[in-house]
Image (cartoon, rainbow, N blue to C red):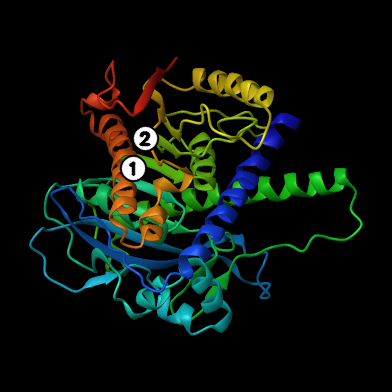
């Protein structure tokens, strides 16, 4: 029981440390007088459409709202394949940026995070490759679906690459977990942080952390499952002018997440057999476990890809003995994964936790060397992600998972029982 609780706690603690590091680096970037950032062109054959939805889960109360009748509301951005020759204005990189900027507190947080890029995100000068409300591609008849935890802006490059290869991606903004979530009508909801009561003993602080982390990951997993339910309903009914009516192949669904999102996606996969593939992008929980463990003891029912940065030889915030124990635990958990699961350790130069997102590409600020390295690592992480989805959901043969692997910057180990 205690080990399971620790695993859940570290999912949040590790992410908090990562975000703190990113924040300090972003502050340095903010001091730079100019800003240069553009997304790489997706490599697939489809253009990209995007539509945003505010969805409310009537089965779950919003315990943080001042309104006792409120229920949990989410912003979900649906990215989908569109016809290559479709015309239209490219959608902004960050939807809702203007209404965020109208709130002084939110503007301050966003300026601290994005620096000189923030005004360009507000004005729309930084664009995605998506066209808002574009008609879906007429072929193929149905598309596989990826549930992404969490958010749109940090993972736009990854989302666009997947969509360009024929996937629908539902990017979920986890309300109260994301820094700020902009809803239609001008409402912006900030992250929720419970104040820590004074006078708590170390044991009481630990218990409080355990309960908070367990609640957060569980709530996020429930968000993914709710979104899958909503997509299922809309796929049948076509309500709300749903652009993908009868076009979603819900027999081919994956859950994917980075960092804390990886833990959330993993928990959703443990709970829901409708999800046929699970992708954790650097979402392991050192020094305790690779995947979250809960008292119900639920394991994976679908193939899993654990794609992570190789930490061999790197400085770690814990002892080598703790790390050795973590590796044993990680191996034991991977051995319990279903057939077709893979553990991939990436060892490309300059690869960090944030390399799975757009972060390092933004921070490069147009520097050709830094931009080149950030693009290389983005493409590396995206190649393995796409290959696993293609192999698992489309039945494709993928050289990246052959023996020996096609990439010299990866160590690939297959698992399955």
Kindly check if marks 2 and 1 are in contact, taking CB atoms under 8 A apart as contact.
yes
Q: Position of residue 243 (x, y in %)?
A: 24, 63
Q: Is residue 74 visible?
A: no
Q: Identify the element where label 2 is drawn.
A: loop
Q: Is residue 397 left or right of residue 380?
A: left
Residue visible at 35% across and 27% down? 410
Q: Position of residue 241 (x, y in %)?
A: 27, 68
Q: Identify the element where label 1 is drawn.
A: helix
Count of labels shown?
A: 2
What numbered label is drawn on residue 305?
A: none
Q: Is residue 408 left or right of residue 96?
A: left
Residue at image mark 2: 348
**Which quarter of the figure has residue 294?**
top right
Q: Nearer the viewer, residue 204 or 404?
A: 404
**Which quarter of the figure has residue 297?**
top right
Q: Residue furthest left?
A: 85
Residue visible at 67% across and 45% down? 214
Residue visible at 31% across and 64% down? 37
Residue at image mark 1: 377
Q: Is residue 148 above or below residue 291?
A: below
Q: Is residue 256 above or below residue 21?
A: above
Q: Quadrant of the N terminus?
A: top right
Q: Position of residue 237 (x, y in %)?
A: 30, 59
Tag 2: Cα neighbours inside 10 Å, few (<14), some, or many (≥20)?
some
Q: Is residue 251 left or right of residue 174?
A: left
Tag 1: Cα neighbours inside 10 Å, few (<14), some, or many (≥20)?
many
Q: Is residue 178 above or below residue 334?
A: below
Q: Position of residue 59 (x, y in %)?
A: 57, 58
Q: CA distance from mark 2 to mark 1?
A: 7 Å
Residue visible at 39% across and 67% down? 53
């Amino acid at each position: 029981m205690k080990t399971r609780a620790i695993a859940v706690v570290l999912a949040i603690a590790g992410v908090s440390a990562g975000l703190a590091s990113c924040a300090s680096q972003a502050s340095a970037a903010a001091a730079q007088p100019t800003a240069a950032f553009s997304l790489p062109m997706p490599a697939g054959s489809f253009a990209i459409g995007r539509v945003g939805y505010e969805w409310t889960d009537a089965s779950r109360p919003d315990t943080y709202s001042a309104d006792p009748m409120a229920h949990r509301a989410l912003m979900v951005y649906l990215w989908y394949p569109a016809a290559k020759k479709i015309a239209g204005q490219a959608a902004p990189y960050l939807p809702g940026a203007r209404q965020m900027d109208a709130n002084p507190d939110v503007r301050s947080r966003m300026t601290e995070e994005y620096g000189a890029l923030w005004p360009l995100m507000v004005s729309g000068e930084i664009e995605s490759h998506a066209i808002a409300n574009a008609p879906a591609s007429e072929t193929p008849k149905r598309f596989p679906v990826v549930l992404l935890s969490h958010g749109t802006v940090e993972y736009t490059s990854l989302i666009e690459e997947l969509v360009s290869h024929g996937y629908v991606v539902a990017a979920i903004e986890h309300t109260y977990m994301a820094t700020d979530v902009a809803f239609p009508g001008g409402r912006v909801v900030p992250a929720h942080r419970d104040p820590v009561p004074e006078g708590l003993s170390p044991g009481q602080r630990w218990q409080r952390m355990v309960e908070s982390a367990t609640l957060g990951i569980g709530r996020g997993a429930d968000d993914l499952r709710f979104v899958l339910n909503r997509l299922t309903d809309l796929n049948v009914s076509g309500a709300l002018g749903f652009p993908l009516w009868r076009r979603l192949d819900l027999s081919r669904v994956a859950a994917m997440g980075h960092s804390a999102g990886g833990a959330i996606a993993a928990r959703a996969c443990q709970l829901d057999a409708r999800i046929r593939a699970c992708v954790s992008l650097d979402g392991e929980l050192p020094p305790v476990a690779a995947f979250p463990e809960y008292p119900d003891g639920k394991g994976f029912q679908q193939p899993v890809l654990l794609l992570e940065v190789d930490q061999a030889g790197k400085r770690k915030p814990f002892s080598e003995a703790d790390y050795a124990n973590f590796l044993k635990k990680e191996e034991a958990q991977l051995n319990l994964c279903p057939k077709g699961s893979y553990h991939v350790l990436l060892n490309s130069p300059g690869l960090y936790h944030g390399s799975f997102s757009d972060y390092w590409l933004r921070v490069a600020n147009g520097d050709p060397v830094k931009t080149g390295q950030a693009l290389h690592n983005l493409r590396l992480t995206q190649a393995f992600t796409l290959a696993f989805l293609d192999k698992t959901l489309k039945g494709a043969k993928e050289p990246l998972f052959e023996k020996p692997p096609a990439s010299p910057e990866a160590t690939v180990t297959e698992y399955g029982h």
